[in-house]
Image (cartoon, rainbow, N blue to C red):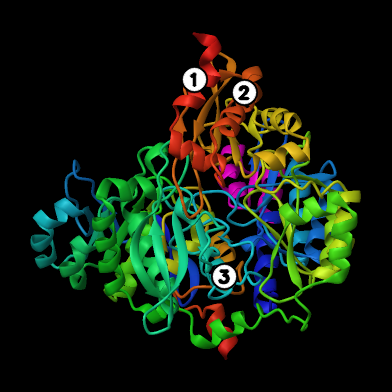
Amino acid sequence: MYRYDTIDKAFVADRAAEFREQVNRRLAGEITEDQFKPIRLLNGLYLQLHAYMLRIAIPYGTLTSKKLRKLAWIAKTYDQGYGHFTTRTNLQLHWIKLADAPDILAHLAEVEMHSMQTSGNTIRNVTADPYAGATADELDDPRVWAEAIRQWSTLHPEFSFLPRKFKIAVTAAAKDRAATRVYDIGLAMRRGRGGELGFEVMVGGGLGRTPYLGATIREFLPTRHLLSYLEAIVRVYNRHGRRDNIWKARIKVLVASLGAEEFARQVEAEWAKSEHERADLPDVELARIRAQFTPQFDKRPARSEALEAAKAADPAFARFLRHNVHPHKAPGYAIVDVSLKTPGQTPGDISSEQMEVVADLAERYSQDELRVNYQQNLLLPHVKLDDVPAVHAALAAAGLATPNMNLISDIIACPGLDYCALANARAIPVAQHIAERFADPERAELIGELKIRISGCINACGHHHVGHVGILGVDKKGEEFYQVTLGGSGENDAALGQMLGPALPADKVAPAIEQMVDVYLRERREGERFLDTFRRTGVAPFKEAVYADAH
Amino acid sequence: MPTRIKVEGGHMMPVEDPFTWVADDQDLVQGDLILSLARFQQEGDRLLSEGRAVGVRLKSDEEVEALAYDLPRIAVVALEFPKFRDGRAYSNARILRERYDYAGEVRAVGDVLREQAHFMLRCGFDAFEPADGSGAQQWQAATQRFRHVYQRAADHRVPAFEEREA
């Protein structure tokens, strides 16, 4: 876990002091809201339907107990006692007063946190594989590189006014848990022929109103050149990305209009002209960062008698093990998911009290570390198998142990019209209705992996394009309707979903899910997930079931 | 003469501007001039041969590469910010300083706000025409807010990774 040194600490303190002065100018009436808007947006402060929303950066989704306790305290002190984790592993507080914002930033700075670059047309908070440092299938801890990117991108003087926002995700594992194909830049670590490490560089992925999967512009970039190469990519984008139309300003549109090959040529030409060592980190700095991501594990037996006994005695615990506990690279350890998807609750919401519980568990059982993933859940990355029963019991007592990871009620949803000024329709109640309908854990388990993703508008914050079932809220003459897509995925088998048919009214969405699940259960062959069955049968049987009444 | 802010000896100073910006639809005047790229290409040679200092003002969609050959005889490159959100001029400024080693004045014109001072200075701008009524003192303060920086850019600040090595 990276710890700030005096330089990093001074930086966030300076930033908080700068923002305090800017807010004071606004509160004193020296600047108008119009003039203040770009300033607050550089600090993640949005004006939403009811109040200011503060989006706090959680670089590569990694937190300590101290940080999470501070977030809990801030939510309790300055908000309504809860926060909302987003698909970009940030935490949003939706009921902030402007006058409190400088104090909040100062409190965050105390625990090595900030809200820089969580909004605006900048390089946003970098994300990474949530299993980093804990999974056996990775070549390196991707957070070493994510931290290098965090520092490089922080108040980057050339790239703070890009055509549009810019998001980078890093993974070092074979299985893509960071959705790298739908990022502006996705970096996937590979090993070269000579054994050296490098990145496959994907550019131009993204969701929103024109979704694209990223194109690989370089199969293998030696890791040491990461920053100079990123600088070349972002420079080409800064100079040539469209600025005349906000809907065509993302890098994906530039890559699509030039073609990936031509875009790659321009990047390579720019990179060839630059002095790489001016941007690339020296080995000693990389070594300094790497040294902070080296968890130590005890030698432990691969099998835990305590866990096996609990599993035999308690079917609920056995189910939790099946869905929320994953293999760890060290024998005798596990990765434990914390579900923020209790049916009936808002996906990604967590109360201050629950944050305290998770912070305590991380400190006691998980080497003081926890992670946020883009599915809006948390996880404890380094739990001893012997401790899993105790962790489960504590999570269950706090309402955080729903055994539904990757199941039908583990729904991603954006805040939607309940909070967001951009939304056309509500997302949260739709998610709640579906989750409640499938609240029976046995039935959910029978249905198996099924990823539902809901966005309240075309900006696609809920990732609907890459849901096995995607649901998009649209406004039809003042009424909320929902367009359903099927067959999307944001993982190794990445694909964009296909349209099911005409948009459905709000009260027909959950029944339609039920009808489609019935089709799947009827049609599925041995070992097929919903997605596999859909890809084999195509949309026809699903469409027929949902729109049968309409004929 | 209108004033601008100029970096002199590491400090932001209010200084008089000897240059006159002459838009394409205006008649030339006496003295040192700043012209558009198109006009410089047509009339630059003649004006330089008269012994005047000449600068060129680039729109945000014009690239400094177009000036590369002429840089040694251009006294000022003025880079336009049609809106503060249009960040193309930052790339132009860095390329001028870091790739072409341009030693003349790089001036920020247009929607130039004190909130951008830190970024502009780091990208190699050394003269500013603020549009928000801010003065040299405020610009000086804005560029001293951060004790450290994380990247090498066109200024001479030592990035964090190098400070740590020391």
Magenta segment includes A102: no
Q: Does the residue at mark 3 contact the one at mark 1 (Cβ under 8 Å)? A: no
Q: Are marks 3 and 1 on the same chain?
A: yes
Of the two numbered discs 3 and 1 in the rendering, the one whose residue sits closer to the viewer: 1
Task: Using residue A336 as the reference point, say whether residue A530 is left or right of it.
Answer: left
Spot occupied by residue A60 in the image (x, y as percentages of width and height): 62, 62
**Residue carrying label 1:** A544
Q: In whole angstroms, how far apart are the C-alphas of marks 3 and 2?
A: 38 Å
Q: Amino acid at mark 1?
A: Glu
- Subunit bearing disc 3: A
Q: Which residue is found at the position 24% from the left and 62% from the top? A: A265
Q: Residue at x 31, y 68 (%)?
A: B95
Residue position for label 3 = A137
**Magenta residues?**
A21-45
> Which quadrant would the N terminus of chain A be assigned to in this image?
bottom right
Secondary structure, mark 3, is loop
Label 2, label 1: how far apart the Cα atoms are: 15 Å
Pointer 3: residues within 10 angstroms few (<14), some, or many (20+)? some
> What is the distance, in whole Å, between disc 3 and disc 1 at their CAs?
41 Å
Residue underneath mark 2: A509
Determine whether A70 is above or below B126 in the image: above
Q: Report which quarter residue B1 is drawn in.
A: bottom left
